[in-house]
Amino acid sequence: MLVNQFLILAAVLFCIGVYGVIARRNAVMVLMSIELILNSVNINFLAFALRNGSVDGHVFALYIIAVAAAEVGVGLALVLLVYRNRKSIALDELSEMKG
Amino acid sequence: MFAEASTVAHEALSSGWFLEHAFLIPVIPAVAFALIIFFGKKLPMKGSELGVLSMVASLVFSVGAALQWINRVNGATEEQYIDPVIRSWTWWNSGGFEFGIGQHIDGLSLTILVVVAFISSLVQIYSLEYLRGDRRYTHFFASLTLFSAGMLNMVVAENMIQLILGWEIMGLCSFMLIGHWWEEGANSRAALKAFFTTRTGDIGLLVGTSVLFFSANSWTQENLGVSGFSIRGLSAWALTGDPSHAAITVGAVALFIACIGKSGQFPLHTWLPDAMAGPTPVSSLLHSSTMVVAGVFLVARLYPVFFEGMNIFGSGVNLITLIGGITIVIAAALAFVQTDIKKVLAYSTVSQLGYMMMGLGAGAWMPAVFHIFTHAFFKACLFLAAGSISHSASHHSFEMKKDMGGLRKFMPITFTTWIISTLALCGVFPFAGFFSKDEIIDNVGHNGYQVFMVVGLVGAFLTAAYMTRATYLTFFGEPRGASAGESHDDHDTHDAHDSHASHGPHESNLLITVPLMILATLALGAGLFNATPFGESWERMTKWVEPRSVVVEDMDHAAVGETRGVRAEEAPVGEEPHAAEGENGAHAKSVCGTSTPEKGTCYAPQLQHAPFKWSKAAMSVIIVLVGMLISWLISVQMYTKKAGFFVGLTGRNKLLALGYRFLVNKYYLDHLYEKVIVHGIAHPIAKAAYWVNQNILDGIVNGAGLVARRVAGWVYRNVDQRVVDGAVNGSGAVARGTGNALRPVQSGKVSQYGALLFAAAAVAGLVLIMVNT
Amino acid sequence: MDILRDHNWVLSVGTFLPLAGVLVMLFIPKAEEQLQKAVALITALATLGVGVYTLTLFNYDRAGEMQFVAQTNWISVIKSTYYIGLDGISLPLYILSMVITVLVMIYSWDHIPSPGNPKAFLILMLVLQTGMAGTFISQDLILFFVFFELVLLPMYFMIGVWGGENRQYASLKFFLYTMFGSALMLVAFLALFFKTGAESFAIPYLVENGGAIAKNTQVWIFAGMFIGFAVKVPMFPFHTWLPDAHTQAPTQGSVILAAVLLKLGTYGFIRIAIPMLPDAAREWAPYIGLLAVIGIIYGALGCLAQTDMKRLIAFSSVAHMGFVMLGISTLTSFGMNAAVFGMVAHGLITGMLFFVAGSVKDRYHTLEIARLGGLLKQVPHLAWILGFCVMASLGLPGLAGFWGEFPAILSAYSPLSGLSEVTFRVYMVIAAMGTVLAAAYLLWLFQRIAFGEPKPEFGGHTSDSHDGHDHAGHDDAHHSDIHDVTVYEWVAWTPLLIAIVLFGVMPNLLFKLIDPAVAAIVTQIGG
């Protein structure tokens, strides 16, 4: 099995995603990066599911896709609202939660 | 012999309605109090009529009961124990025991009942005039009535709790009455002081009652079917020899501390002179028959407990005698330096209470109780006379030196009654005080307390001297100050209604003089109730009042009856256990109080009576007369010569020979008065005593208050607010500090959070890998 | 027993009826203030009516056992049941809570504290009533805990919304402190539950089986309960929330707090902690007694240092509850009788004192003792009522306070066998001294407030001119707030005043109820 290749792909995607989440200022880009992270996890799940011959990984992957869709929906709605209120979606300007 | 005895045995003690219903005596004024409070202001005489009526009713009940008691005693044999008339109802239960409330009527309680009801009635009648127009007339009568109710309740009390009830009600009423004119700070402070001082003594009452209860309860429940609060039970228990001596001693000492506070004994007497801030009728009532007598009464009431606990007869000195003796002298000495007539009388009361205590401590039970009886009359009379003077002559001033003098011409009735009472107080034959005070001194000596006999005689001397001085200042010489018609603006206007302001001194009206005359009559004649000098047939009070120290056999009889109180309700008459065995047994066995009776119960210790000797009596009367004479001479010299003294004083002084020098020195000016006494015998002691009184004793009281406040303040500020509260607030502060420290982390920047998250995850992952490999 | 069973609805109705009132009030608009008040009052009266009916049904010959018992499944997962009942200890407190609520409602008729909003205020009070009554009848620990906590919230809002200037601080302190105690208490309850085999939370069951737990474990469990209840009482080192809460709370809150809430703690000791953990109780008793007497003296000293009348009364609660705890710590039926009596008496008397303090504040807008004076002249009835309460509070025989105080001192002479007599006798003497201090601070308070001339700032100058026949102050137009006792106040206070005298003169009305119930508990600890 080509497990290693799948894992390497997932790791690369994950790192790109993390970089995006941390480094990008645009909220939409951050959301997309989160999608990348989630998909990297999906790849891992599927890889191991195939290798072990069980269906659990597939089920999980489907769940994650569903949750990710919902998450993007909510996330985009939030971004829209933020944009409407502040005319900007730059994340480093949103620090109302500062303690 | 035996047959005779058994007929005696079945001779039932007589009783009667008044005796059976003596518990009503305090109830009447208590009800009257409530009525006055709620309806008093609407009544034509603003409630005072209710007060007077209730007291008269109580008096009638008391006298009725007393007569029936006398009948009961007369119907009994010589050797028979006269059972008190006890009734009891359940008041509260706790821990499986029932505690009663009821009455314990015997000679002692009836004596005091009659006196209290009598004096209270007269004082209330007197107050009708004295407080006429007072702004709190109704309140005054309400308090006065409740006060008497408290005292009466204490006297009829069947058990200690009931006694405490009356005791504390009196304390409360004394607070209200002494502070009657509370607009002035001094009065309310005096009220506070009185309540607080007596309350301090009451620690002893609470502790002593507790100690005695738990020590006695099982015995009394088992043998008499009554609780360990019951006065009867405690008396019997104390004389069984059963009690552990430590317990009974602690109990007796604790109770005695309460008596010291209430009866103004040294060192807790300081409240009593201050209590003069109240209206004069209050002083009269407080000082003659109620309140201050309460402590003495308690000792007399629970005499077996004190007898055993204090080891009376056991040694040459005990706490009661000692305190009594000290009080006599200290207080009498203080009376010399007073210029306020009421304060002279107040110290005199303290001193006389000392006599009563000393007598009780030395085993002279009957003379002491008799002294309560006679003292009530003449002291009430003296106070009321002082009130009469201030009311009608001196514009509400009590200053003898400033505002009185020469009043005998203007107030003949007040003067006469005062003189009679003074002679009674000094103990001159044949006035009432002689028969009681002299008996105390005599018996104290007879019982082996020689030192205290001397103290008593010194006291008698001092009493004669200071009373003579007060009498002189008030009634002789020339009128001064207010009595001479000078106007006074600075006097308290509390007595209100200065309708007399424009008149000179004059005699008071009948509402005041009639009580005075009645009391003076008794001050003259009350001694005949127990006139020991005239032979045994005159010793009526001894026969009626003194509990007989007879071993009452047949404990089973008592135990079978379970609660004798309950039985008494059904068959109050036949309570006397069969004396058939008692007759034989009592003679065969040792007497009560000196050792344990093998079988049976004692209710009173065996006491002795000093045989009366005219020689001894004459000696004490002579001492009194000498005291009067000396004091009289000094006073006369000072006052009659005063006017002409300035003239040629220096010249005469220089010219006269040395032999006259002592006499000449007596002619010093009025303002040297104090100094004359300083060089006399009494004054250094008096000054010292007064100094101790004001600075040390009062200082301790005040200081304790001050220290308590300081400590309280300090504790509150430092411990409560800082440490204890600090700990609470501190935990909050710690939480806040931690929060502040962590604040920068919460930057609000999502990307930063994310970075942190992944960094943490990475670290956690590393750790996991390291741990697993 | 059948008759009793048939009537076991009275407790549930009596407890939850106030919630029905709340429901009605929720549908009434906020603006209809009179209607709100009327509904609340009627609800409270109806509740009291049920309470009185309970009194008539109660079998006084069997005051030692639980009556009106009702038991049904509730949370079966944790084996907790809805289990209620009433005995001679619960009954007086149960009725007391109802009476106080009614009286507070009457008082509220013209005394709604700022910022107004009677709807919310009265609803909170009714919820409070349910909590209080429920606590006293619970026979299941979880149920007890729920009611115990239910009380907390309304009180928190009462202080926090209707309180004085410093209300935020006070209410939070009150809430946190009590929650802290409750948390430990809950842990203790759970420990007890599991240590008895996780069978049941029913109080009778735990009482029966709690004694079998090893002594060491008992001591620890007791510690948890101790803190929970001691905070509520409050005992000496845990009392600091009380003065703040009392000072800041509105009058009604103070009254309920003093009259009923403080009793939840002592009730917990008597009903739960001591009978369930007898060995631990014996171990703890000397320390409880020690804290109690420290509380007595310390509370009194605290009082002496006060300059604020309400704060003084609050501190006096610490001292008085010290007497109650001293009685409990003896573990004898004498002591516990005194304690339960003391709880009721303190509820009546201190409740009354807070009423008076509230009314003084209404009139003078200050409770600073130094600024007050001559109340007897300006508001004679109010001042005499204060005097009466002061006398009752310092334990004058013939009034209710005495029967809590004196028997407690008495009982300390002879604690449960096995406890150190010497220790407790020392406590007794200290407690007796406490009575003197009580007299000192209360009379001092009365002297400074009621006696003397009214202060100039409150129109005292007018009194100089009067001729001594009437009371001054009425003619003073500048101080229209200063008036004597109003009708609402009379109606609200008279029952309390009567009760204080009644229980003082006839203590057996209560003792007869309490004694058998206490005896049943004392047998658990081998007394």
Image (cartoon, coloured by chain):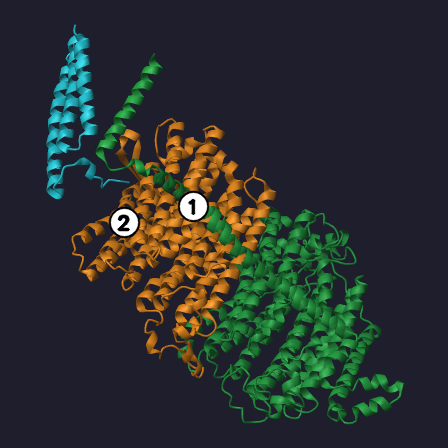
Q: Is residue B456 left or right of residue C336?
A: right
User: Mark 2 — on which chain does it sit?
Assistant: C
**Mark 2 to mark 1 CA distance (whole Å):** 21 Å
Residue tagged 2:
C127
- The residue shown at (23%, 58%) is C117
The reply, left or right, for residue C491 in relation to residue C505 is left
Pick whichever of labels 2 and 1 is earlier in the sequence: 2
Residue B693 percent coordinates (x, y): 67, 67
Chain coloured orange in the rendered structure: C
Is B136 placed above or below B194 here?
A: below
Which chain is home to disc 1? C
Identify residue for label 1.
C266
| Residue type at tag 2 | Val
Residue B750 relative to residue B129: left or right: left
In the image, residue B118 above or below residue B484: above
Front-lying residue, B458 or B230: B458
Give the residue type that dot 1 points to: Thr
Q: Quadrant of the N terminus of chain B?
A: bottom right
Rendered colour, chain B:
green
Q: Colour of chain A?
A: cyan
